[in-house]
Amino acid sequence: MAYLELISGRAFGQVFRLDRQRVTLGRDPDLCGLSKPFVEDRNVSRKHAQIELRRGRYYLSDLGSGNGTWLNGEKIDGPRRLGDGDRIRICAHEFRIHTEDSSTWPEPDVAPVGLETLFVDREIDSSCVKVAIDAPLFEASTPPVEIANAEEKLRAAFQMLARIGGALRLQDVASNLLEGLLDVFPQADRAVIRITPEVDPGSSPAVGTGSSPAVGTGSSPAVGTGSSPAVGTGSSPAVGTGEIEAVKRRHPERGGPVPISRSIVQTAIRTRRAVLSTYLESDPRFNASESVRTMGMRSVMCAPLLDAQSNVLGIIHTDVQREDVRFGPEDLDLLTSIMPQVAAAVGHAQLYQRQLEQDRIDRDLELARRIQQELLPKREPAIDQYSFFSFYRPAFHLGGDYYDYIPLADGRLVIVVANVAGKGIAAALLAAKLSGELKHFLAGEVSPATVTGSPLAVGTARLNRSLCESTMAEHYVTQILMILDPASHTLAVVNAGHWAPLLRRSDATVESTAEHAMGLALGVNPDETYRQVDLTLAPGDSLTIFTDGFINAQRADGERYGLQRLTAALQPATGTASSAAGGTGSSPAIGTGSSPAIGTASHIGQSLLEDVDRFVEGQTQTDDQCLVYLQRSAAPLFSAEPSELTN
């Protein structure tokens, strides 16, 4: 039986049997017998090529593909006979064919090791010995030949550790380690490393059963060819995931997959101990394994890579194929002595990789934060007799709170404050969606001739239905939507499940507004109806709209700032709202007597923020904070020049 060995492409290292008279290669699994390597490559045709067995010979044909089929570097235009070792290329995927008369080709029984997950036994106690000699030595007629003295091996080991200690990338650690292992153990013919992401000792499946998988090839770009091999190619996941698999051969010209014994690997991982089998063929622990009998290994060492908590990071496997040399106990002693340093280098490289990824995420989040800031108003509205203050501070890079000032053509001003349930990226995206839909509604539904009335409530209901029908319906949104008419000094207010705005009258009384007409939050009930409440602002009146990030701000002892303190901050007092409500602080009160609030809206808003910050005493903010404060002055603050909002 012939085999196709994938030597370049996503599924590198895998082997596919040609077990039918005719095998079609292509992207469509319903039409092709061999589609697995190509299913995600749009450059490969649905039915691309075909391999056919005729009278004991294999022939390759192109099936009219868009990008052609290549044999040994030449594009074919008709059936071509295949010989052992021929190379077949389909787009970025290159195969080598091994016919049944190839004497060096071992028959695999399962997929390559890159598709497997290392097994960690949940019952192994964490106090067990991490590395130890765990193998009786089975005598043979002749003892192992001593190839290198201890001094030379130690020198090679120190050089290897220095190289991997200075490597930052995981693939560089693996490359230097494999090359160093062949220097440290001159009798070794092959060295394999497999590094996996951190494994939960109770969740990983067993490696499986059956014969051993194969790793790498002799002529592919995987580790093991040339003097400076590239690590991390083949069927292994990308290096950026923290997982890598690679092999290094002492004799790269000896092609074919590199088999490793699953039973030996399982023993090393399960026991958290290094395994030595000096004479593998007579070792009763493993000689019954079919994989061991067919792999041609004479002597093996396998050791787990363990972190400080005894979690398995991966394995190192090295073997001897020659008859005249073997591994001995002194070799296992040396291997176990360097494993902690190797594991540390692997761990540092994984941390470095994660840090690079985190840095990239942080850069993306910072860019997203700047974009979100651009969606917020760049300046306060300039309206005669009114002053404004607004503040927005997300708990993380991005937040789900949102506010906006939207001028209408007739001189009125739309004011919106919203709070998306949750925080972070999802909440920020929903807030952006809400902003766009609100502006779309305002462009077509709010008649310039209408000062107060139903369109505001109708628009809120429309936003609610849109959110209920969206794919982000698991998030709800509380919202205050208002229209200020500076000509009549009226406010039309619709409340969708939000904290009621606080209205401070000129006589210093503070009351919640539109609380009785509050509807459900947006995204809860698609059939919810909303009511509009109309307010009149007298000279000196002010309105504070806020999100729950202020109410829920808390100190180290868990006490929250609360609505009572926020209300007190708007009332006359001899001390701060924090002290008046039982907190600490010494800033002056915002208002005195029955006079209007002292200073501009900006001064009053900043005083509120300072009072909240004093209360939390430096505790980390855990919720987004958004505040809009508007105040009608007792006398015009601006001249009668045209407002920017009416342009």
Image (cartoon, rainbow, N blue to C red):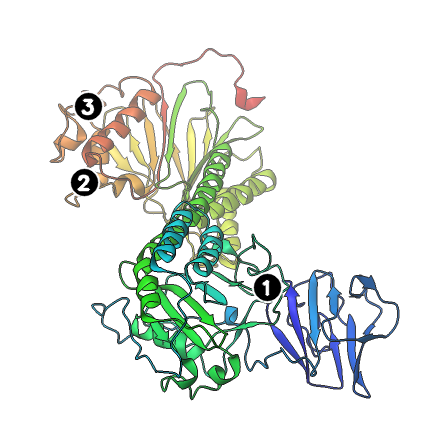
Q: Residue at x 43, y 84 (%)?
A: 281
Q: Earlier in the sequence, mark 3 or mark 1?
A: 1
Using the numbered discs, state the Cα–Cα distance from disc 3 to disc 2 in whole angstroms: 21 Å
Tag 3 residue: 589
**Which residue corresponds to the image point at 72% horizontal and 86% vertical from the top-left?**
20
Mark with earlier residue (2, 1): 1
| Relative image position of residue 590 (x, y in whole percent) | 23, 23
Disc 2 to disc 1: CB gap under 8 Å: no
Give the residue drawn at x 52%, y 46%. 433
Quarter assignment of residue 541? top left
Disc on res. 301: none
Task: For marks 3 and 2, give the one nearer the viewer.
Answer: 2
Query: Which residue, as the protein is rendered here, is positioned at the far left?
Result: 582
Residue 80 as seen in the image, left or right of residue 591: right
Q: Residue at x 32, y 70 (%)?
A: 329
Which quarter of the rendered picture does the N terminus lie within?
bottom right
Q: Residues within 10 Å of mark 1 (few under 14, many from 20)?
A: some
Determine the secondary structure under disc 2. Answer: loop
Front residue of 416/403: it is 403
Q: Which circle marks residue 252 in the picture?
A: 1
Estimate the x, y position of residue 79 in percent, counting from the top left: 86, 75
Q: Amino acid at mark 3?
A: Ala
The residue identified by callout 2 is 555
Q: How many other residues sit within 10 Å of disc 2, few (<14), some (14-19) or many (≥20)?
A: some
